[in-house]
Image: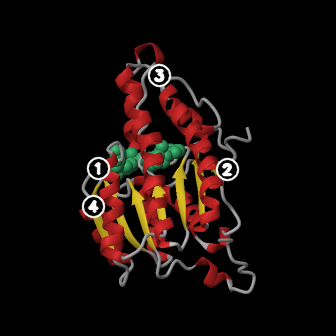
Amino acid sequence: MAIPDVSGQSLTELFSLEGQVAVVTGGAAGIGRAIADRLAEAGADLVIGDIGDTTDVVASISERHPGRRILGTPLDVSEAASIVACADVAVSQFGRLDIWVNNAGVYPSVPLLDMTDDDWDRVLNVNLRGTFIGARESARRMVAAGHGGVIINLASTAGYQAGGPGVAHYVSSKHAVRGLTKSLAVELGPSSIRVLAIAPTLIETPGIEAGREQFRQSGLGDILDTYAQRLPLGRTGVPDDIARVAVFCASDLALFMTGSTLLVDAGDVAL
Ligand SMILES: NC(=O)c1ccc[n+]([C@@H]2O[C@H](COP(=O)([O-])OP(=O)(O)OC[C@H]3O[C@@H](n4cnc5c(N)ncnc54)[C@H](O)[C@@H]3O)[C@@H](O)[C@H]2O)c1
């Protein structure tokens, strides 16, 4: 099934996600929350999965985008059964699944010599295995329905560079997410399922705020602030800087793109 030629459609038509159903993992806070909000604005109905409480995000996005159907569901992406259940919620409640955003991720900092096997496994399980299983479960449902779809994975500039000490597990997971994205794109392309990754630089989120404190406590200094000061575009990111690109990836504007990782980095990796 080849993707269509959409040259005749208007930009408004191409941008619209009306009638589509999206799942955002880790959508209760930070980047995932901003992505969920913009996908709803573009017209998608949403399932927001999170290990934390989704009551507030569901209420807030529902109020901002009346008419959208928005559900929250408990989700732990380190558990395969939990991901399966989340995908089932989308299909059973909304009848289809078009867009899956593998956003949930963790980035604790631990100096290499202190890093335990469990530290390593936790980060790889959430960031990489969770992304693999999310992609597999969403693709299974998209292939069964026969209408194609889009999978968006959150990588990082840490998928291109080491960033700094204390994040060997995180850097490894995000390099792997870029590779996984390419591999999935090749396998799923014939089913008209596009797979893209987004690689943000430093974005101010609740997770980063907690990370700042952890860097200080683990004796690694205020690396994040130093990092921010060198960005060519002059500021750190806000979650919506990433959400706008996620909507582009999900939309038919990006219909001829798959397998790429889009750097959204204020020039960080170019340095
Ligand atoms: N913030 C940044 O600077 C930055 C930069 C590059 C990449 N990223 C990536 O973007 C994604 C989101 O980062 P963020 O900064 O918004 O994080 P955050 O910590 O601010 O928010 C993450 C959300 O995911 C949820 N979550 C955590 N573990 C989960 C699990 N096992 N299952 C389901 N939900 C879970 C949390 O409850 C939270 O709602 C991550 O994949 C991260 O690696 C972030």
Q: Give the residue number, with chain letter if any, for mark 4.
A: 73
Q: From what the image shows, is residue 57 above or below residue 116?
A: below
**Dot 1 beta carbon under 8 Å from ligand 1:** yes
Residue drawn at the location 75% of the way across and 81% of the way down: 7
- Residue 48 lies left or right of residue 100; in this view the side is left
- In the image, is 56 to the left or to the right of 263? left
* Pointer 2 residue: 233
Q: CA distance from mark 3 to mark 1?
A: 28 Å
Look at discs 4 and 3 and give the one toward the viewer.
Answer: 4
Local SS, label 3: loop
Upstream in the sequence, badge 4 or badge 2?
4
Q: Quadrant of the N terminus?
A: bottom right
Sequence-first tag of 4 and 1? 1
Q: Which mark is residue 220?
A: 3
Label 1, on which residue?
51
Which one is earlier in the sequence, the residue at label 4 or at label 3?
Answer: 4
